[in-house]
């Protein structure tokens, strides 16, 4: 059994999409397993469909939060690796190129 579900986050912020897709399949011992499309490693399992939906939403929230923290750390490292005076005076396009390397 495989199915695709669509998850909506009603109170989503501007920095997090409000719709995700997940593939659901039946695993061993009757567990349902969800894997979120486009978020590598974001998956969970539960005995019931309702619990699976709750856990999948929680997994998405934690995944996005972890990625934000990781990105913030990379920005701080980039900041530390450059002379702060020079970094502050970078034009926006050069700043964007620098953070894309992160």
Image (cartoon, rainbow, N blue to C red):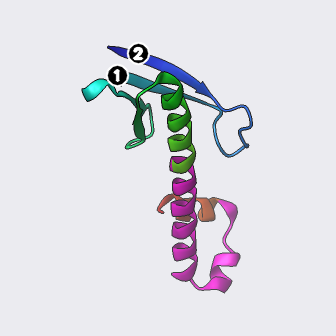
**Residue that carries the numbered disc 2 in the rendered image:** 3
Instruction: For mark 2, give the secondary structure.
Output: strand
Magenta region, mostly helix, strand or loop? helix
Instruction: Give whichever of 88, 71 is nearer the camera.
Output: 71
Q: In this view, does 41 lie to the left or right of 18?
A: left
Q: Does the magenta stretch include residue 25?
A: no
| Residue at the outermost left position | 28
At a point 54% along the width and 49% down the height, the residue shown is 62
State if disc 2 and disc 1 touch (CB < 8 Å).
yes
Please state the extent of the stretch shown in magenta in the rendering: 63-92
Q: Where is residue 100 in the image (x, y as percent from the top left)?
A: 51, 58
Q: Is residue 8 left or right of residue 35?
A: right
- In which quadrant is the N terminus drawn? top left
Instruction: Give whichever of 73, 36 is nearer the camera.
Output: 36
At a point 62% along the width and 65% down the height, the residue shown is 95
Q: Where is residue 36 in the image (x, y as percent from the top left)?
A: 45, 33
At label 1, counting other C-alpha atoms closer than 10 Å, the crowd grade (few under 14, some 14-19, many 20 or more) is: some
**Residue that carries the numbered disc 1 in the rendered image:** 25
Q: Is residue 71 magenta?
A: yes
């Amino acid at each position: 059994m495989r199915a695709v579900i669509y998850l909506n986050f009603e109170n989503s912020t501007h920095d997090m999409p409000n719709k995700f897709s997940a593939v659901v399949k039946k695993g061993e011992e009757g567990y349902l397993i969800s894997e979120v499309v486009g978020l590598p490693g974001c998956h969970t399992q539960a005995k019931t469909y309702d619990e699976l939906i709750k856990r999948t939403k929680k997994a998405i929230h934690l995944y996005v939060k972890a990625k934000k923290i990781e990105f913030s750390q990379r920005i701080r490292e980039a900041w530390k690796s450059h002379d702060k005076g020079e970094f502050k005076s970078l034009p926006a396009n050069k700043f964007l190129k620098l953070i894309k390397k992160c």
